[in-house]
Amino acid sequence: MFFYEWEPSHEILRTVVIGPITREDIQQHIERVARARWFGRAELIDARAAIGSLSVSDLRTLASQFRQVSASATPAPRAVVVEELLNYCLARLFSNLVTGPARFEVFRTEAAARRWLRKHVSES
């Protein structure tokens, strides 16, 4: 389940992911972000409460979709926060598969993710 909150004082879209998530859930998230034209907004994805069951093939499909739907505009930076080792590894793999103009980093703490986003938002 995905929850969205716009933080105007920080210029960050905060997305919280809770419970089991599938490739289809993430595809819907990417489509929602595209439809709402949020790719131009920095995003903090808090996935510490997410339970993923994604394969490498799923990650390749998702990275391809992300590149396709964000191709019309340079996406703002995205930071994902995870705690579990497996989720951390999967998120790092996804960040490497996205490549291109997207700045996508993975963190263990929300504080570190926010510092990185603030730095990259101020550079934009």
Image: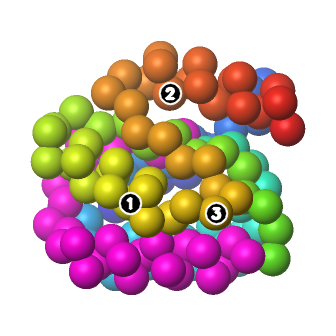
**Along the horizontal axis of the image, is 59 left or right of 62?**
left
Residue 15 vertical position relative to residue 107 in the rendered view, above or below: below
Please say if 63 is above or below 124.
below
As shown in the figure, which amino acid type bears the numbered disc 1?
Phe
Instruction: Name which residue type carries label 2.
Output: Ala
Q: Earlier in the sequence, mark 2 or mark 3?
A: 3
* Picture coordinates of residue 23, whole percent (x, y): 30, 76
Which residue is identified by label 1? 94
The residue depicted at 62 percent of the width and 48 percent of the height is 103
Residue indicated by mark 2: 113
Please state if 71 lies on the left or on the right of 112 as rendered: right
Do labels 2 and 3 touch, CB within 8 Å?
A: no
**From where the camera sits, is residue 19 visible?**
no
Give the residue pinned by disc 3: 100
Pointer 2 or 1: first along the chain? 1
- Camera sees residue 96: yes
Do the numbered discs 1 and 3 sit on residues whose CB atoms are within 8 Å?
A: no
What's the residue type where badge 3 is placed? Gly
The answer for how far apart the CA atoms under marks 1 and 3 are is 12 Å
